[in-house]
Amino acid sequence: MNPSREASGPTTVVRREDYAPPAFWIDTVELAFDLDPVKTRVLNKMRLRRNPDVAAQALRLDGEDLNLARVLVNGAGCSFKLDGETLVLENLPEGQDPFDLEIFTTCAPEKNTQLMGLYVSQSTFFTQCEAEGFRRITYFLDRPDVMASYTVTLRADKARYPVLLSNGNLVEQGDLPDGRHFAKWVDPHKKPCYLFALVAGQLVAREQRVVARNGREHLLQVYVRPGDMDKTEHAMNSLIASVVWDEARFGLPLDLERFMIVATSDFNMGAMENKGLNIFNTKYVLANSATATDTDFSNIESVVGHEYFHNWTGNRVTCRDWFQLSLKEGLTVFRDQEFSMDLCAEASARAVKRIEDVRVLRTAQFPEDAGPMAHPVRPDSYVEINNFYTVTVYEKGAEVVRMMQTLVGRAGFAAGMKLYFERHDGSAVTCDDFAQAMADANPSSDLARLLPQFKRWYSQAGTPLVQARGVYDAAARSYTLTLTQSCAPTPGQAHKEPFVIPVAMGLLDAQGAELPLQLAHWSQPEAGTRSFVLTEAVESFTFINLDSEPVPSLLRGFSAPVVLDFDYSDAQLLGLLAHDSDPFNRWEAGQRLALRRALNAIRADGPVERDPLDAAYLEAMHTVLRHPTLDAAFKELVLTLPSETYIAEQLDVVDPQRVHAVREAMREQLALALHDDWVWAYETHKDNGAYRPDPVSTGRRALAGMALSMLCLAAHGNGDLVWPGKAYQRFKDAGNMTDRFNALASLVGSGQPLAQDALARFHAMFRHEALVLDKWFALQAGATDRGGNVLPAVRRLLAHPDFHLRNPNRARSVIFSYCSANPGGFHRADAAGYTFWSERVIELDAINPQVAARLARALDRWKKLAEPYRSAAREAIARVAARPDLSNDVREVVTRALA
Ligand code: PHE
Ligand code: ZN
């Protein structure tokens, strides 16, 4: 148990409105580490000065789990005390400013299972300091608005730790007595302490020198364990592409001589943007065609881009306080999304990326916004900041930035970024500062005109609902569209003011042709998509010169993060699916058709219908699948039914087993009814030649994989043995991990007897590849439940010799895949899934509170559940909440869930 955790100690709420500037500034930091897994010694020499703008007060330095040995002020002993874990210096020498403060502490990296601060992973030292991990390394003003210059000396045994890395430039290195050596690093840029990093161990690097537009040369390095060199090419290519893109699109160059990425297999999150020394979860670095899927390749591209782009949006300009987290995260997610889209050669591939991003937002963020943890993009308070690295701060934050771009245009957005850096480079600022720069750079834009109202996106939680109604007046040849916006209450926010909602739209005629748009006061019509800005609770737009009732295509490209309600007829949706020029809405029309059928079957009385889909829907899917010009990736998205989670969000009361049964019935019907089309799709898309992770061949593999899983599912229903046999053969012969894994998943997903043999083979083949084993575990824990068989399988997986609870990736692969990604297996009428969940939350909390708190959120939406699930879930949460020794992290989540 974390020794710093006090049983039932008071939990402090941190409030945004309480922000006060620091009483002291730290200008320089000299750190010297004697690295030892058992006891690492840290000497921290700082130069401080009083902040003249703040009334005189004691110096209070944050610390956590540290052993304090010595404190010197200006080289002499001084009086100090500890207030809890805070080091307090009350009698600092009068009138001496700046002054030197020297603190000597030790810590125990090997015992650090939280993976915050300095820890050991596979005999290598790593650090993780965001958000408040630096205080676990030394006493400090651990807040992002204190920016200092760092000089770091690392000393360690040379044989065990040949590579010694920290931020910035290597200025000196050499040998020391007793087989030890040292390296000294100087970071030329001031930074907040959450961007500090060190790495020490046996590592090898792929290196590449690149010359930037301005002629400056940079050294790029990707460090991994010696056996992993053959999995670094894609990460390096992604890094090079990131450097090129940020210069080309935003004029932002790399400001370092050396830029390093290091991979570790023990990491709480995806990756971390430490200045010049990014530390990554291996999952987002290591890939080759034999071990990684297309999804892995594209995630690596996004995450490498994301961390690299933080160098400007996050590091050069950082956050004043952690409430401003979306300042860097929302903006950087937006940038990585744009990066991935800009790397697509085809417009259709851009649309596919947009659909995928929106799908994440709607299946993960919308539920968060409607649940007990709902919070604004810029939260007002927190107990544990680690709980606020959320889809709201990241993905909804990115949508807010995207709406700004929509309101000021692409060029206007680039101008706003430029002004933002002119004003704020080198400082720690707020979300308001960003929005202000965008508005000021575009003084005649809607954003500037509506700025205070627009900023409600930062302050109000909850997903707005936009209800649209259309009335056609044949005599006047006009169509009046009325948009009404509302937003349900969220914790602490009963009443919401109207948002600024950009609505991109077009009108189609009955044949699906795009109609010119003309508002009554426009002198002439305009073709194509137009954006209208909704600012009132209710607003109407009247379009003229229309010969018949048009079909509106609303919220094109998902122009705002809202729920759009329009009472489309099936015929209108089928028309949009067939003809809309906006690929996002084309996909959306298909989703609406499927969702409507799912909801009808769920709400119907009696047992679940065998065939919930009608001929019109099946015909439409047949047409999409066989379409001569649509690309494969898009087809795969259209043919994929809305997830159980997304369907559940549309219901007031959720019976998860019924949702599961209905969706499975729909899948089986699609599999059987389109059997010949699936055979065609598989045969015509299965061979891509040499593996390349580009959008076109990725899309072909995705469609072939889907077809194979549908053919195995159909076989499950009709006793056919041919397709399971073909899938098994494919599993054995596949030339890349995507095809191999899809074949394996087809067998497992359809409950084929061959699945067991394939799983055993897969394990034997990849038992030395940790990231592949994660997939093996996740596939089984996430498998379609058949008569309650998944939970016993999950319990067996926990006892597997390759299962390690301490490794976050492995814990996630089994426990999260079951509790968060397998609703049909998890929500059991006998409550055994919930019991399993509470046991794991408690067990993990003693090891790693951050990971435990994420798992704790699996039951966020318990209030929506039907009985007996609802009561059983509440009891399971209450069982966790009753523990006296919970971390702040888990305590905050379960307290809010029960409130
Ligand atoms: N700042 C990291 C990112 O978004 C995420 C992170 C947060 C990593 C906290 C570790 C700890 O890129
Ligand atoms: Zn980030």
Image (cartoon, rainbow, N blue to C red):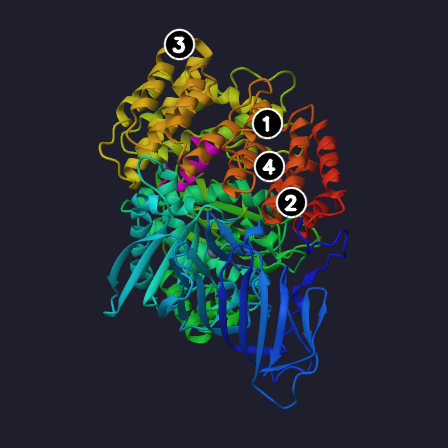
Mark sitting earlier along the chain (3/1):
3
- Residue located at (32% from left, 44% from top): 231
Q: Mark 3 near mark 1, Cβ–Cβ under 8 Å?
A: no
Mark 4 within 8 Å of ligand 1, using the beta carbon: no
Q: Nearer the viewer, mark 3 or mark 2?
A: 2
Tell me the residue that label 4 is attached to: 649
Mark sitting earlier along the chain (1/4):
4
Q: CA distance from mark 3 to mark 1?
A: 31 Å
**As rendered, which of 791 and 488 lies closer to the eye?**
791
Residue 612 falls within the magenta-colored stretch:
no
Tell me the residue that label 2 is attached to: 845
- The x and y percentages for residue 816 are 56, 37
Assess disc 3: are there few (<14), some (14-19) or many (≥20) residues with their C-alpha within 10 Å of its C-alpha: some
Q: Which residues are magenta?
A: 572-593
User: Please, what is the three-letter code of the amino acid marked with disc 1?
Assistant: Arg
User: Please, what is the three-letter code of the amino acid marked with disc 4?
Assistant: Glu
Q: Is residue 185 left or right of residue 793?
A: left
Secondary element at image label 3: loop
Q: Is residue 198 left or right of residue 690?
A: right
- The x and y percentages for residue 124 are 45, 52
Q: Nearer the viewer, mark 3 or mark 1?
A: 1
Assess disc 4: are there few (<14), some (14-19) or many (≥20) residues with their C-alpha within 10 Å of its C-alpha: some
Tell me the residue that label 1 is attached to: 795
Tell me the residue that label 3 is attached to: 720
Q: Mark 3 near mark 2, Cβ–Cβ under 8 Å?
A: no
**As rendered, which of 880 and 87 lies closer to the eye?**
87
